[in-house]
Image: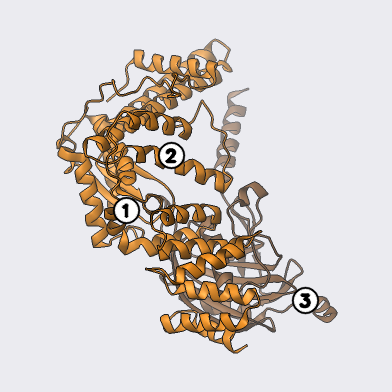
Chain colours: A orange, B brown
Amino acid sequence: MTVGRRGFLSGGCAFCATGLMACMPADQTGRPLTGIDGSIDLGPRVAPGVRTASSASADDGLRAMFDQMERRLRVSRFLVRDGRLNAYIARVVKGMADEYAGDIRPYVIRVPDFNASQASNGMMNIWTGLLLRCTNEAQLAAVLGHEIGHYIRAHGQERDGMRRQAADIQQFLAFIFAGLGVAQATDLTNLILTASYFNYSRDHEREADEIGIRMLSTRGLAPIEAARNWENLRAESEARGLPRYRSIIDASHPDPGEREATLRARAAEMPAGDPRSAAYREGISDIREMLFEDQIRTGAHGATVLIADRWISVDAKDGLALYAKGEALRLRAGGEDEKTADATLEAALGAAETPAVAWRSLGLLRRKMGRESEARELLNDYLRRAPSAPDREIIRRTLTS
Amino acid sequence: MTPHRFRSFVLVAAVALSLAGCAFYASVGPGAHAIQGKLDVTLDSTWNRQVDGASNIWPETWTRNGPLLDTVHLAPGIEEGKALVNLPENALREYPRYRAGSSPTDIVAFVQGTLARTVAASDFELVEVAPAEVAGHSGIRFEFRFGAGNQGSFETDRHALGYAFERDKQLYLLLFHAAEIHYFAAGKPAFEAIVASARLPQVRAAAR
């Protein structure tokens, strides 16, 4: 699928307009006016089942590339193969994709960051960091619905066509400008073409957000959770100290603040729906411990505390989340961290699903605090609960020193 | 620009671009080698020591068959609050920092957290943490498996072996990690020999 000249130029104009205003205009309620709202027709551009059949030649190249990536993914050590988890994810995808369920193939990949992606051959990648950051099914479904939106609107193919066209125009103009002796003008046209491309990309994301929230609403899931994803992500970016600057020229996605405001406004127009928290926790229960351990290991302790707090707000007796928060605070060890870590780990020991390493964590902390006899008791508890732990020898040495 | 000069320019530019992502190495050993004046080791064979390139961020990096296959990192004297690698402060935002008096478990987590950033390591499986004598000091020996390169790059099952001790609130780390298939077992004896040869410099040791 290719992008028409008119569409391409309108993309360029849209960029210029956005650039001149340097911000997104909003209506009286604060909703950003993006041109994509509840009234827009977002019908499918791909019929169910056709992606498994042959297609146009330019599209075939893209599909072959994704097919190769999918073959590699199937044998990757990072593919999460837990049966119960995959059955649950497949159920959620099927519920969202309806007649496209046979075309979408979800893969859970062990990467502790927030992301999911959809390739035009049907391969859907879901990173484990996304699963940890969602605390209910509606939040996950909002992301999966967004990705399915990219698929049914053929955004991947459209962007690929746009990329090819931009490259052709760049080459042609570079030749003309060089002949006229004004080769420097090529830089300006490249900038405009790049900006036009990314403006299209941002509109694709807005379309996919709208499709995702419509899917949530029609399936009885809570639409407000789509906005909460972005609220949570913004809070995490702040906790991690990530830069807030976003280029209006080469940002592939809209500003998270804009997405949150848009989705929040759309959710207010829809029935409240069900977040399905219990079903979600049950669905990912086999890998929750792994998700928290991987997050702790990233060293982004501020983010770990935020994520754990979200789980604790759902269930104050969530032993895994209490341990993760306490461990992250113990490792960060700044200001009041150790005091809070002590109380949090203490609470974890009396909660459900608490891993044995929580006893070790509190034992090491109490030892550092000089509370030696309590530390010894906790470390002995750890060895009793995890007799074959790989660090048992060094812990025993700690106890005898 | 004449056609000849233009061709030369294109050739030089192509070579420069192709080298931009490369690391540069110089041979080291056999014989005695001082690591930043903080640790002395004796090598019984020749290694390739990284001397430049974007990935040259560890205090000392050596390899015999290329970093994707086997790597030794030597990091002597990591101070309180410092990361294991040398990068601008804004790039170090989420790198773990050393805390003096860290427990053996936390030292291993410190190393794993750094590898998570440098080689996209994840899926850590701790094999062992045990007491060990390193450079005449009471320290630890640790071993873990992990996967590296999980975001579309070359994936490898890797195995790491490390030795560490603390002295004057500074961490001394000797780390070997290699592809699980063949290279870990093949390189382990040479690394163990390096660890066995490790000594603190005479002047520093005498001053204590």
Residue at point 52%, 22% (across, down):
A23
Name the quarter where the C terminus of chain A is drawn. Answer: bottom right
Which residue was labeled with disc 2?
Answer: A230
What secondary structure is marked by label 2? helix
Which residue was labeled with disc 3?
Answer: B201
Residue depth check, mark 3 versus mark 2: number of the one nearer the observer: 2
| Of A188 and A266, the residue lying toward us | A266
Residue depth check, mark 2 versus mark 1: number of the one nearer the observer: 2
Circle 2/circle 1 CB separation < 8 Å = no
Which is more N-terminal, label 1 or label 2? 1
Give the residue type that dot 1 points to.
Val
Relative to A16, is A68 on the left or the right? Answer: left
Q: CA distance from mark 1 to mark 3?
A: 50 Å
Crowding near pointer 1: few (<14 within 10 Å), some, many (20+)? many
Vertical order, B177 against A382 (above or below) = above
Residue A292 percent coordinates (x, y): 43, 61
Which residue was labeled with disc 1?
Answer: A108
Crowding near pointer 2: few (<14 within 10 Å), some, many (20+)? many
Relative to A207, is A354 on the left or the right? Answer: right
What is the quadrant of residue B179 in the picture? bottom left
Give the residue type that dot 3 points to.
Pro
In the rendered structure, find residue A286 and report the number of the disc placed on it. Answer: none
Vertical order, A45 against A123 (above or below) = above
